[in-house]
Amino acid sequence: LQVLDNLLSGSIPRSLGQANLTTLDVSGNQFTGDVSFLFARDKALSTIVLRQNKFKFDFTNVDLPQFLRGIDIAHNQIYGSLPKRLGQLPLSFIDVSYNQLCGPIPKGRRLKRFSPIRFAHNKCLCGPPLPPCKK
């Protein structure tokens, strides 16, 4: 499902979380609220693009889909920390920049290969590929 660059507003219907989608792209709109219900380990989602909206939710305990290959949540108001399982997924792209995320980037060689720009402009993310966390 691709609904991008339409300046749509309001919240995403919870029923969308029950749809059997492999790709979801709602970038470039003005959607608001908590869309953590879109994520779950058993979902078929391989690509999720939420960038440039006004989503606001705690990302810490989001259960990422097991087949996730790409995630772009940049330019929102998402807070908390990155889910630990993020470091175990075989991602081909990631962008979590320009949010309010904090804490260490999950360990795993996969995340280290991405540019620091993909993690920049957050509240206090740290660890490779960003500078080390303060002790």
Image (cartoon, grey):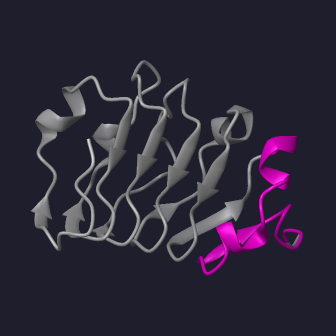
Relative to residue 102, is residue 45 drawn left or right?
left
Q: Is residue 68 above or below residue 124?
A: above
Quarter in which the N terminus is drawn: top left
Nearer the observer, 2 or 120: 2
Q: Which residues are magenta?
A: 107-133
Task: Name above or below for residue 31 compared with residue 59.
Answer: below
Residue at position x 16%, y 52% in the image: 12
Q: What percent of the width, then of the height, locates residue 62?
A: 46, 41
Q: Position of residue 90 (x, y in %)?
A: 70, 33
Q: Let me know if residue 39 is in the magenta part.
A: no
In this rendering, the count of numbered labels is 0
Give the quadrant of residue 109: top right
Q: Position of residue 123 (x, y in %)?
A: 59, 78
In the image as oriented, which residue stretches furthest toward the top? 42
- The residue positioned 35% from the left and 58% from the top of the image is 57
Q: What x and y, as percent, mark residue 34?
A: 26, 55
